[in-house]
Image (spheres, grey):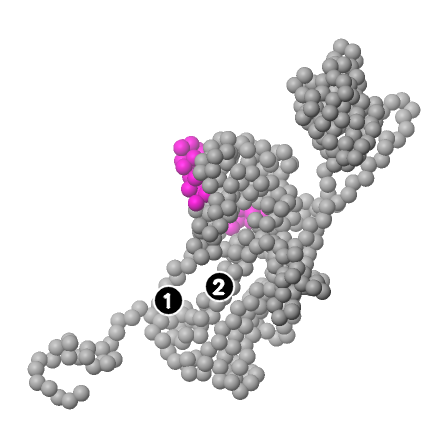
């Protein structure tokens, strides 16, 4: 610019490109404060490798030793000996069993099974009153009956043998990947903001974005993922990319809706003692532990807050979360009711507007209850109710997370050990993970809004 006449003012100086110094805050501020499901898993060490390296995992649970039947037809009732037919999933009832039912006329009464005729999914049963002719028994279609013991005669023979099976559950791991690529020029060019390490380059900022996104992807899938019908071993996969099979892991919502307890408020958008009793009754009916944690989003939490605040200060307390006897560094709402200890755990990721929010009202409007204890292993020992399963890394010499779950490697001419002549840096992240829930029949999804 040539010389000119006049007062040296701000407009004159600012007209010269880049002459003014700029006041720029070099800090990069974090407005993404989501506590993800995988973060909670890390806090309580709920991660377990798949030692075989096979991309799926199985577990077995024992079945109930008792069975409840429903009366579907009545032959005789109101007598010391009655006969009826029940719908049953197996040939459970046998001669010498002791009978009880929820018929109000049978209160306090017991009967002895003297004859059983199995049918196809049914059994016709003859029962005699233990108290004799003075105490008739009653049967009505729809009554629930149980056989909670047996009584043998003198010089008795062995009762009919029962066979108890086990039930298998399984899930699959899912491959998650992310990538970053930067050129030689931009890698060394400085920008106005810095990372905690004091680096003014674009590379570490992009890496932070990518890792946060990848962890959010994993967290979302561990909550809302649906197990794929396709497996890596399928010869003709329904899901495939480039002809190669793609499999997905089932998340918490899939586990509970497929195998667990599913219930909802009498009127969506309301919550009171009716709903609280329904939750507890479901635990009792399924012999679930009464010390539970309920994962919840803001929308559902708001409905509960209205109810609990009306109970006064004795209704709900803020406590430090404890899982498997370990204290977790986060506060939760805690209530005690009917012998149950319940922690409501707010998960901010459920409010993420681009992942859940209003996009998944069925999930964000529900409470996911998971027992806080460890499940007992038949024969001794315990195992976590919920954990992340992962396969060992197939990569040699790759960097990764301190827990060995996620791997990172770099290629290109700018890598620590150049791999080709292209002047860029290519970074890959890779992890193979899946959610495992044990004893999921005791989990509960309760929709409130």
The furthest residue to the top:
134
Helix, strand or loop at mark 2: helix
The furthest residue to the bottom:
2
Residue 171 % position (x, y): 65, 54
When the figure is inspected, residue 248 is found, relative to residue 270, above or below; the finding is: below
Residue 417 % position (x, y): 56, 83
Quadrant in which residue 263 is drawn: top right
> What range of the chain is rendered magenta?
299-328
When the figure is inspected, residue 445 is found, relative to residue 34, above or below; the finding is: above
Sequence-wise first label, 2 or 1: 1
Residue 372 on the magenta span? no
The residue at the point 52 percent across, 60 percent down is 217
Q: Residues within 10 Å of mark 1 (few under 14, many from 20)?
A: few
Provide the residue designation for mark 2. Answer: 213
Would you say residue 130 is visible in this rendering? no
Would you say residue 274 is visible in this rendering? yes
Provide the residue designation for mark 1. Answer: 28
């Amino acid at each position: 610019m040539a010389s000119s006449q006049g007062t040296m003012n701000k407009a004159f100086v600012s007209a010269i490109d880049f002459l003014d110094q700029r006041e720029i805050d070099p800090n990069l501020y974090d407005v993404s404060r989501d506590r993800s499901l995988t973060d909670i898993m890390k806090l309580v060490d709920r991660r377990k490798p798949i030692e075989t390296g096979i991309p799926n995992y199985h577990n077995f649970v024992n079945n109930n030793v008792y069975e409840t039947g429903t009366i579907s037809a009545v032959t005789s009732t109101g007598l010391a000996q009655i006969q009826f037919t029940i719908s049953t999933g197996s040939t459970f009832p046998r001669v010498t069993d002791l009978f009880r039912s929820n018929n109000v006329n049978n209160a306090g009464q017991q009967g002895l099974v003297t004859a059983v005729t199995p049918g196809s999914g049914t059994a016709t049963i003859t029962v005699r009153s233990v108290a004799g002719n003075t105490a008739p028994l009653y049967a009505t279609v729809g009554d629930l009956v149980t056989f909670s013991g047996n009584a043998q005669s003198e010089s008795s023979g062995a009762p009919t043998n029962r066979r108890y099976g086990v039930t298998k559950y399984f899930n699959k791991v899912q491959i998650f990947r992310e990538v970053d690529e930067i050129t030689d020029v931009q890698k060394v060019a400085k920008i106005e903001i810095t990372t905690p390490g004091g680096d003014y380059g674009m590379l570490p900022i992009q890496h932070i974005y990518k890792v946060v996104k990848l962890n959010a992807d994993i967290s979302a899938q561990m909550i809302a993922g649906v197990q794929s019908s396709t497996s890596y071993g399928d010869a003709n996969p329904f899901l495939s990319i480039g002809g190669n099979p793609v499999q997905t892991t089932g998340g918490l919502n899939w586990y509970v809706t497929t195998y667990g307890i599913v219930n909802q408020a009498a009127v969506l958008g309301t919550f009171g003692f009716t709903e609280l009793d329904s939750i507890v009754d479901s635990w009792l009916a399924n012999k679930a532990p009464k010390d539970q944690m309920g994962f919840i989003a803001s929308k559902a939490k708001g409905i509960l807050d209205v109810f609990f605040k009306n109970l006064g200060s004795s209704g709900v307390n803020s406590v430090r979360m404890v899982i498997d006897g370990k204290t977790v560094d986060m506060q939760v709402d805690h209530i005690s009711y009917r012998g149950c200890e319940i922690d409501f755990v707010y998960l901010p990721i459920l409010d993420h507007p681009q992942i859940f929010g209003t996009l998944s009202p069925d999930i964000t409007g529900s409470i996911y209850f998971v027992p806080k204890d460890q499940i007992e292993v038949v024969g001794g020992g315990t195992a976590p109710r919920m954990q992340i399963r992962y396969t060992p890394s197939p990569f040699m010499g790759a960097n990764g997370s301190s827990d060995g779950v996620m791997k990172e490697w770099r290629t290109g001419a700018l890598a620590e050990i150049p791999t080709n002549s292209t002047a860029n840096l290519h970074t890959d992240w890779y992890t193979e993970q899946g959610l495992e829930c044990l004893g999921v029949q005791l989990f509960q999804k309760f929709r409130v809004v």
